[in-house]
Amino acid sequence: MKVKIINKSKHELPKYQTPCAAGMDLYAHLEMPVTLQPLQRKLVSTGIFIELPEGYEAQIRPRSGLALKNGITVLNTPGTIDADYRGEIGVILINLSDTEFTVNDGDRIAQMVIAKHECAVWEEVAEISETDRGKGGFGSTSH
């Protein structure tokens, strides 16, 4: 599938690192390094603007290596880029470690997954069907 993209950074376009990868790496677009103190969050620019087809979204997700090695994750995981959004893609990073972490220009900071979605049309009813699970909520399926 083709997606229109504007790249205002000096970095390569988001890309898949392996042939079967679902997510494309996003790169930081910074004039100066950004340091995240423990528990601090910041919006990090990518310099990327996209035009998704209707019925698709871009999900912004953490990179597992940054999360495991450094405690850096995406705060609103997954972040959603809607098909009608035309602004720059920014990534809200948070430092969940106990040490500061510096993001440099060109660092791989998140991954982006393009996904098809449906739009719901609500049908108000008086009752909904019963299931074996019923009203069982958080932790109700563990034994």
Image (spheres, grey):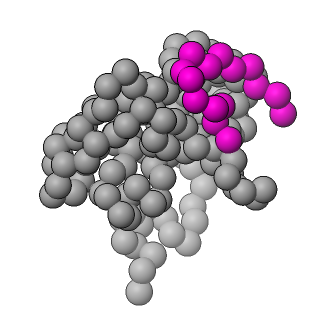
In the drawing, does residue 127 fall left or right of residue 24?
Answer: left
Relative to 2, say whether 135 is above or below. Answer: below
Q: Which residues are magenta?
A: 1-15
Q: Quadrant of the N terminus?
A: top right
Q: Position of residue 16 (x, y in %)?
A: 69, 47
Which image quarter: residue 59? Answer: top right
Task: Find the residue positioned furthest to the bottom.
Answer: 143
Question: Does 36 lie within the magenta span?
Answer: no
SS majority, magenta: loop
Q: Position of residue 109 (x, y in %)?
A: 45, 42
In the drawing, does residue 141 fall left or right of residue 21?
Answer: left
Q: Nearer the viewer, residue 104 or 118?
A: 104
Instruction: Please name the residue shown 48% across and 52% down the image.
Output: 63
Relative to 90, say whether 69 is above or below. Answer: below
Which image quarter: residue 125? Answer: top right
Instruction: Please name the residue shown 54% across and 38% down the image.
Output: 26
Residue 43 in view, yes or no: no
Q: Position of residue 87 (x, y in %)?
A: 52, 13
Residue 97 in view, yes or no: yes
Instruction: Please name the residue shown 76% across and 25% down the image.
Output: 3
Q: Position of residue 37 (x, y in %)?
A: 16, 43
In the drawing, does residue 52 fall left or right of residue 126?
Answer: right
